[in-house]
Amino acid sequence: MERDTDEIISMSYGSGGRKTSMLIEEMLLPNLGNDKLNVLGDGALLNTSGNLAFSTDSFVIYPYFFPGGDIGKLSVCGTVNDLLMCGSIPKYLSLAFIIEEGFEIENLRKIIDSISKTSKAAGVSVVTGDTKVVDKGHGHGIYINTAGIGERIPGIELGKHRIKKGDKVILSGSAGNHGVSILCSREKLLEGTIKSDCAALNKVTAAALKYGDKVKILRDPTRGGVATTLNEFTEGMNFSIEIDEDSVPIDKDVRTACELLGLDPLYSANEGKVLIIASESAADNIVNDLRNIEISKDAAIIGEVVDYIPSKVILKSTLGGKRILEKLSHDILPRIC
Amino acid sequence: MCLGLPLTIVEINGKNAVAQMNGIKRDVRIDLVPKVKIGDYVMVHAGFAIEIISEKDAMETVDAVMQVEKVISDEGL
Amino acid sequence: MNSDIKTIKSKIDKINKIDRKINIMEVCGTHTMAISKFGLRNLLKDKVNMVSGPGCPVCVTPDLYLDYVYDLSLKPDIIIATYGDMIRVPGSEPHRTLENAKAKGARVQMVYSSMDAVTLAEENQDKNIVFLGIGFETTTPATATAVMEAKNLGLNNFYVLSMHKIVEPVMRLLLEDKTLKLDGFLCPGHVAVILGEDGFKFLEEYKCPGVITGFQMEEIVNGIYTLANCIENGDYKVKNEYKSLVRKQGNIAAKNIIDMVFEEKDDYWRGMGLIPKSGLRLKSDYRDFDIEQLYPIDFSIKRENKACSCGDVLKGKIKPDECRLFGKVCNPDNPVGPCMVSSEGSCAAYYKYNNVL
């Protein structure tokens, strides 16, 4: 089946020659262009103030387009959110594509468009980038890497060393949406409205950080879900975290899908949620403020920090029994982000 | 995996059917419940409806499984 | 909901007031998981010794089959279609998993329904698709239907490895083992959907109380409560507490489908050896779909990891945490035996849900 070569990416798009220029000039610059990127230098020259946060993430998700987002949106939100979790204001992104020969240009256009919209909404600029093309069979469609720089907010120091007994654990919304959404679209198991919660969390972290040093740590529970991220907090520490099973917000359709598929929403990835640990005195107010923001309207206190046992995550079940939530040992869902 | 959830049959095409719950739909085989009708509740296991269940019993199971969400404001914070 | 919790708690209190300590076995892996998850083992430990039996079909499959499946998967003409559970289960050595075979280039496809395996065969005419038929009576009809469909479609590249087992013979074996001192059985709910109350009448021959139970917290607590009362009163008529789904005669359509496609055979169970008429193989009309015709299993090879105590755990002789490998060498990241990695395995249940206090 002969294809019109303008419809798909061929090796010459990655060669640095005319086709590469065309890609940059006709697809990338119009959508992402800004004074720094437009220079098309070997690197971007930046002005920043104060201390910086720096983060990177690679995105190999399949399918590339899923309910609630796509690999482009995810590649921006993923790195933006990591910078926000560090207590910084995200400013600049690098963007690198590794595209498999034969990838449809129309899909690339859509992905770039999505990157453009998401970056603008998140207040970041793509200032430098790279495109490589690999032979058919040596990649899977498209892989994206983004790295990001954020300016640290003065006076904010976040980290698990700040967590103390009595602090409360807040989840900004329902657990497990992204992982379940991807599994359903990939396996074509269920039709329904489960959308990935993929979103940039700027407003949410800003609302929490208004409480200054009352906030101890922020983290977005991506791969491995809420349970795995909570384990990261307690690992090697002399406190534990106790979660109340009935308090964890879970959307009805996510819960249904989990029951049907045998999944646990606490171990399913989220791409638009944040776990916040904050002093007891501020927790209620933080939750109230979060509930005024659309993507955190279901925020809730889901547990607290205890010290009767070290380094564990404990789930209190409906009947009052307690059990330990281990870190996820293996991913039943590969290629989730 | 024995855990199943009762689903409602919404469409039947020969031995294939579509079943739904809370807006989630999935394909199921109805070879084991030949008398099933649209609107019936069935227990699904590994892609097969294994038995028809009464609506009352189905709703009780659904309630138990879904742990009917408490309104957050009731909880207090 | 809160009033339901109170009812459940009061039933638990009543169970804890019975006269003597009783030994109850559950023979359904999902029951094992649910009982652990709801913390019932702990809440009832003073009066009820909940013994987990051979209810996890993956766990009772001997290494012989698991090694065969691993080797089969590496053949270039084969695509393995399987329920998710089988993918990480190790054979006689830890590296012999389908997951590792896949990393080595084997084609292993997880399916949610046996019919997906038939579709896979239609879509891959140049390969032989082998569906791993595993499970007790609940999943056997699904495999049978897939075989019938393959025959109707005239497929010559669809095969089944039947590792299906029957619950009655192993329960009889356990009842005849006096060292176990079993007072009663919690009967598997969805196996009962297929077999009906009639399927468990045989317990009355042993004067052993049995209660057919569902899977929700309230259903399990009610089941244990009823069983405890039956044991106290010497009432060994099988009780059905899952009437919403379990009929007296079970699901006749399902039983007929099983009868059409399968016949009984003597079969090997992990840790229990050969149990007569406890397994199922394809009848002669469907023998062409049996992968063992194409690639026979060598039953003379006996490889079993000596340190793994899965066999004793499955018989209820020891608790998972009494196996010397439990939690140390053997854990979900590095499972030595299937009981630790199967989603219904006793060891996995104990490890995942071990209580804090």
Image: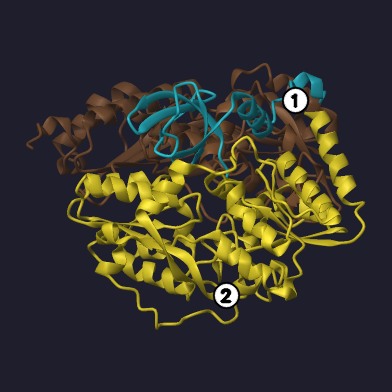
Chain colours: A brown, B cyan, C yellow
Residue found at x 23% / y 64%: C76
Q: Image quadrant of residue C309?
A: bottom right
Q: Which residue is mark 2?
A: C271
Q: Are marks 2 and 1 in contact (CB under 8 Å)?
A: no
**Residue A74 at least partly seen:** yes
Residue C206 higher or lower than A263, as above or below: below
Residue C81 higher or lower than C274, as above or below: above
Which x, y percent locates residue A134?
Answer: 23, 48
- Of tags 2 and 1, the one toward the viewer is 2
Horizontally, residue C62 falls left or right of residue A212, namely left
> For this rendering, which residue is in front, A11 or A288?
A288
> For this rendering, which residue is in front, C163 or A173?
C163
Q: Quadrant of the N terminus of chain C?
A: top right
Label 1: element kind: helix
The subunit carrying tag 2 is C
Which x, y percent locates residue C95?
Answer: 45, 71
The subunit carrying tag 1 is A
Considering every residue shown, the one lying at the far front of the view is C205
Question: Tag on residue A286?
Answer: 1
Say which amino acid is labelled 2. Answer: Gly
Say which amino acid is labelled 1. Answer: Ile
> For this rendering, which residue is in front, C98 or A207?
C98
Residue B74 higher or lower than C46, as above or below: above
Residue found at x 81% / y 52%: C228
Which x, y percent locates residue A84?
Answer: 59, 34
Q: Residues within 10 Å of mark 2 (few under 14, many from 20)?
A: many
Question: Tag on residue A46?
Answer: none
Which x, y percent locates residue A114?
Answer: 38, 25
Horizontally, residue C299 falls left or right of residue C10, namely left
